[in-house]
Image (cartoon, rainbow, N blue to C red):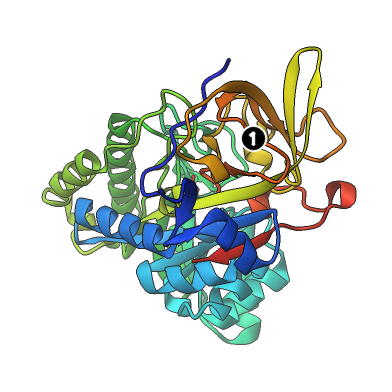
Amino acid sequence: MKPFGPIPSGFDSIDGQLSIGGMTAEALVDQAGDTPLFVYSKELIGSRMADLRRAMPERLSIHYAIKANPYSDILQLMSGLVDGFDIASAGELDLALAAGQSPERISFAGPGKRDRELRAALLAGVTINCESENEAHRALAIGHVENIAPKLAIRVNPDFELRGSGMKMGGGAKPFGLDAHRVPQLAREVIASGAVWQGLHIFTGSQALDADAIIETQGNVLALAAQLTDDIGVPLPHLNMGGGFGIPYFHSDKSLDISRIGAALQGRFNTLPDGLLSTKFAIELGRYLVGETGVYLTRIVDRKESHGVTYLITDGGLHHQLAASGNFGTVVRRNYPVAIATHFVAEPTEVVNIVGCLCTPLDRLADQVSMPHADIGDLVAVFCAGAYGATASPEAFLGHGPAREILI
Ligand SMILES: *Cc1c(COP(=O)(O)O)cnc(C)c1O
């Protein structure tokens, strides 16, 4: 038997079934039309945002990194809840604008921006976080042709990283951002060119669960921003401090203590160096805002034994939930939180392997988990499915087609 991750709080049961927003899993599938299905909860997203606002300094803006979940109904909801969207492609720009987010609140990071993406961003009036000198020069040239002053920030590749983060995106050689020591020169050039100087973006990693690591990194980010600002020679307008707030996916993962992070940040805001006194600060979060608020529901289509192992074979799989299968940036496969949704409160009685319907041994949803007895027709719920699910999985692989999505 193997453990699985903690089922996030906020999920209820009705008549023994998992329920979300007052509807049972079966009723949700009825409403959406079929399985597999991602269900996202408005109520859980709202309370997550409210808790975060309460914990963080008032001065801090909260941005949503829309790559975590760009489902249109989520973007519309988030548009009203956060202070800005962070995008990483022209496709995401279209999604952000379609969701009603105003261009002044959108910033565009990501390596390899093509000229047409830079032009689209510039014409829309969003901030471009330049990932290299070359990219800044191309943006300035496009601005010149279009006769528009581009809004430019510089993404910094810092010399430190977020300790314990799942995906490291700063420290040492990276395709992201400009090595810190080269930032002041480019910033002075951008300012001298007449572009709108928007400031700095320092992102150091993702999926950290240790509040002390985040507090330490935020201190490093502020110190680096202050030093670069001194070198640049003008007060810093904006600082995107990155994010990295993680969620518990696996057994023994603990929720992040955001109140400690907020208090530490407030302390630092109280003692800012001169160059940062009037700076607007933001953090950018993806999975922390939506990850625990979504569930992937998939129906059992077969139940079989092989060499003494019971397999529950579902109509879902890694083509929608790559991360839960263990194939999205993890070294050792561990079980996401999982349950039999149609017997949500029943006691476990057997150990099973829950797999998807793809013809590959990689398609595992839960290994050797202890569950109540489930039969063909029962629903399986995989939790922590609100981020990096549908759009971070190889949906076309093996031709089963996309999952449905609803926000309830
Ligand atoms: C992916 C990404 C995020 C969001 O990461 P989460 O772990 O989902 O919070 C934020 N900022 C940048 C620059 C990113 O690339």
Q: Residue at x 52, y 75 (%)?
A: 150
- Regarding residue 161, the answer to whether it shows in the image is yes
Q: Residue at x 40, y 49 (%)?
A: 12
Residue 27: give x, y in percent of width and height. 56, 62
Residue 91: give x, y in percent of width and height. 67, 68
Which amino acid, by three-letter code, is at mark 1?
Ala
For residue 334, above or below residue 226: above
Q: Say left or right for 265 vs 389.
A: left
Residue reaching furthest top? 307
The number of numbered discs placed on residues in the rendered structure image is 1
Camera-side residue of 300 and 367: 300
Residue 165: give x, y in percent of width and height. 46, 32
Q: Which residue is mark 1?
A: 374
Camera-side residue of 290 and 344: 344
Camera-side residue of 318 and 153: 318
Camera-side residue of 42 and 198: 42
- Location of the N terminus by quadrant is top right
Residue 362: give x, y in percent of width and height. 77, 30
Mark 1: secondary structure: loop
For residue 215, above or below residue 124: above
Q: Residue at x 42, y 39 (%)?
A: 246
Q: Quadrant of residue 305?
A: top right
How crowded is the residue under tag 1: few (<14 C-alpha within 10 Å), some, or many (20+)? some
- Regarding residue 196, the answer to whether it shows in the image is no
For residue 87, above or below residue 313: below
For residue 225, above or below residue 88: above
Residue reaching furthest bottom? 147
